[in-house]
Image (cartoon, rainbow, N blue to C red):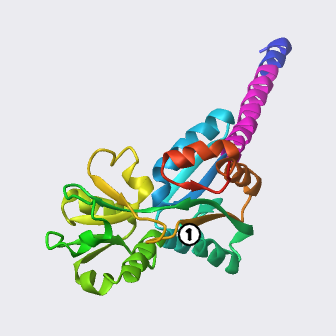
Amino acid sequence: MNKLTQLKLVLSIFLISFVIFSCKKKQPDSKNNHESSVISVAAAANLRDVLEEFKDAYVKENSGRKVEITYASSGLLVQQIINGAPFDLFLSADSSFPEKLKDTHKAFGNSSVYTYGRIALWSSNLDVSEGLKLVLNPKVKKIAIANPKLAPYGKNAVEALKKSGFYTMIEHKIVWAENINQAAQFASSGNADIAFVALSNVIGKEMTGKGKFYELSEQESSPIPQSGIILKGKKTTEAQLFFDFIKSEKAIKIWKKYGYKPVIKF
């Protein structure tokens, strides 16, 4: 092999090595850029329909940003966060659970109310026009309610029943669910005759037209202030952007569409 051929071979090897090195160097940067654009949200089960619409609107308006949402009862999500689950934003079904995270130093800054929720009594086959009195009807053998220790909407339902004086009369009929989505499933599957759920559930796409509902009045059950809080991590700025988006004036129409009472007034 002459010197010219050897030189060409060395140059070829150098160029190939340079290209491979450059590609490997770019791959982690690309991955980091992708990961930095994704926020992880822990959200109360009652928010599933409305947050999916918010997520689509946010991503459409903010090209390159993504939102991943995990839904469960607020109490269960708090336990996961305390145990180290890597969420960036927590959207609770009440205002006490975010404060608990703040007390355990898992949160960044203060919590704030983003909407007010409403409770409804729902049945797939019974007439619910008589309202809360329906729980006393002999036809109602089982009543699905979300666990009040984990689900604020379940707690609110129990408080409404106690306020009406019906709770001790129907306590034996209660079937406890993990969250309000499961309570709705119990009633729709026949494992319960009626269920106390979020108003947003019964007017959402999965339950609309599949049963009848009675919206509890504010005298029977006060609107539930739902608060959120930014969690400690590397994406506090990105999480705040999404949190601000669902609290903005442009969000009012979407909140009202799903039966919520917006924080911002006209």
Residue at 75% across / 30% down in the picture? 17
> Residue 62's x, y, as percent?
69, 36
Task: Looking at this view, name the residue that lies furthest to the bottom.
Answer: 168
SS under mark 1: loop
Give the residue type that dot 1 points to. Asp
Decide whether the magenta segment is chiefly helix, strand or loop: helix
Determine which quarter of the picture holds residue 3.
top right
Residue at 41% across / 81% down in the picture? 163
- Is residue 87 in view? no
Left or right of 59? Residue 235 is right
Establish if 230 lies above or below 105. Answer: above
Left or right of 259? Residue 235 is right
> Residue 49's x, y, as percent?
46, 48
> Residue 240's x, y, as percent?
73, 54
Q: Which residue is mark 1?
A: 94
Establish if 3 lies above or below 37. Answer: above
Q: Nearer the viewer, residue 43 or 148?
A: 148
Q: Quadrant of the N terminus?
A: top right
* Residue range highlighted in magenta: 10-37
In reply to whether residue 183 is colored magenta, the answer given is no
Establish if 195 lies above or below 17. Answer: below
Residue at 27% across / 64% down in the picture? 130
Q: Nearer the viewer, residue 253 or 136?
A: 136
> Residue 77's x, y, as percent?
52, 68
Number of numbered discs overlaid on the protein picture: 1
Left or right of 95? Residue 15 is right
In reply to whether residue 21 is colored magenta, the answer given is yes
Left or right of 204? Residue 129 is left
Q: Nearer the viewer, residue 257 or 5?
A: 257
Q: Nearer the viewer, residue 98 or 205?
A: 205
Residue at 74% across / 25% down in the picture? 16
Establish if 64 lies above or below 159. Answer: above
